[in-house]
Image (cartoon, rainbow, N blue to C red):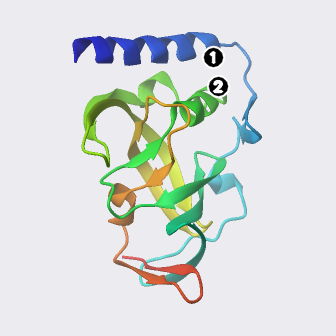
């Protein structure tokens, strides 16, 4: 267990050291993902839902898996809507992009946790603070503690730590939308 933790920390340190720069304004790019280090969701033209609002967010389905558009610290990604996952998860690739763009800082790295993967195995993931997670451009969540998978190719999961922040979620399979009722 100590060896796995050491490997995770070594990988993180390598990414962090490689990302250090004196530039104030940067853009990070990885696999066509671009993040502007100076942009915040509050700078964009978003209209966030308020308490009591009903928000419909379209989803895409592929082999029974529902994908939703999510903005994570100014990075637009597609995440799996996973009500069976206790936490939100990003991969090392997204963490590196966010760090390179200055959206994840040293202060956002919280620690390491053990996680149980869907196949039942136990692994260790980093925990980071994501400042902004926005679902479908309408549902705003601040300060989301997410795990960072050791795998660069790990799926991005929108888990219950975010989903529990709304009053109810209804899946409308006929119209391919998730209906969020805001607390």
The numbered dot on residue 19 is 1
Going by the image, does 68 lie left or right of 26? left
Q: Nearer the viewer, residue 176 or 88?
A: 176
Percent coordinates x, y for residue 159 in the rendering: 38, 56
Mark 1 or mark 2, earlier in chain = 1
Going by the image, does 79 lie left or right of 148? right
The numbered dot on residue 100 is 2
Percent coordinates x, y for residue 168 in the rendering: 35, 79
Mark 1: secondary structure: helix
Q: On the rendered image, what quadrant is the C terminus found in?
A: bottom left
Q: In this picture, is 43 found above or below 20? A: below
Q: Name the outermost residue toward the bottom.
A: 174
Percent coordinates x, y for residue 146 in the rendering: 40, 43
Crowding around mark 2 (Cα neighbors within 10 Å: few <14, some 14 to 19, many 20+) is: many
Q: Nearer the viewer, residue 6 or 53?
A: 6
Residue at position x 27%, y 38% in the image? 115
Percent coordinates x, y for residue 44 in the rendering: 71, 57
Residue 59: quadrant of the picture: bottom right
Q: Contact, CB < 8 Å: mark 1 with mark 2?
A: yes
Q: In this picture, is 177 found above or below 151? A: below
Q: On the rendered image, what quadrant is the N terminus found in?
A: top left
């Amino acid at each position: 267990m100590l060896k796995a933790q050491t490997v995770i920390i070594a990988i993180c340190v390598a990414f962090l050291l490689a990302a250090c720069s004196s530039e104030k304004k940067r853009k990070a790019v990885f696999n066509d993902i671009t993040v502007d280090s100076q942009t915040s969701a509050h700078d964009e033209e978003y209209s966030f839902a308020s308490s009591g609002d009903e928000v419909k967010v379209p989803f895409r389905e592929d082999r029974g898996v529902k994908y939703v558009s999510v903005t994570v610290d100014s990075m637009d990604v597609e995440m799996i809507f996973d009500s069976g996952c206790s936490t939100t998860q990003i991969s090392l690739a997204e963490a590196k992009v966010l760090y390179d763009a200055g959206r994840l800082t040293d202060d956002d790295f919280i620690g390491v946790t053990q996680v149980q993967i869907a196949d039942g195995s136990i692994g260790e993931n980093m925990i980071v603070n994501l400042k902004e997670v926005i679902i479908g451009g309408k549902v705003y969540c601040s300060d989301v503690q997410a795990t960072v998978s050791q795998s660069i190719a790990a799926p991005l999961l929108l888990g219950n730590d975010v989903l529990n922040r709304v009053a109810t979620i209804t899946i409308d399979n006929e119209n391919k939308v998730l209906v969020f009722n805001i607390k």
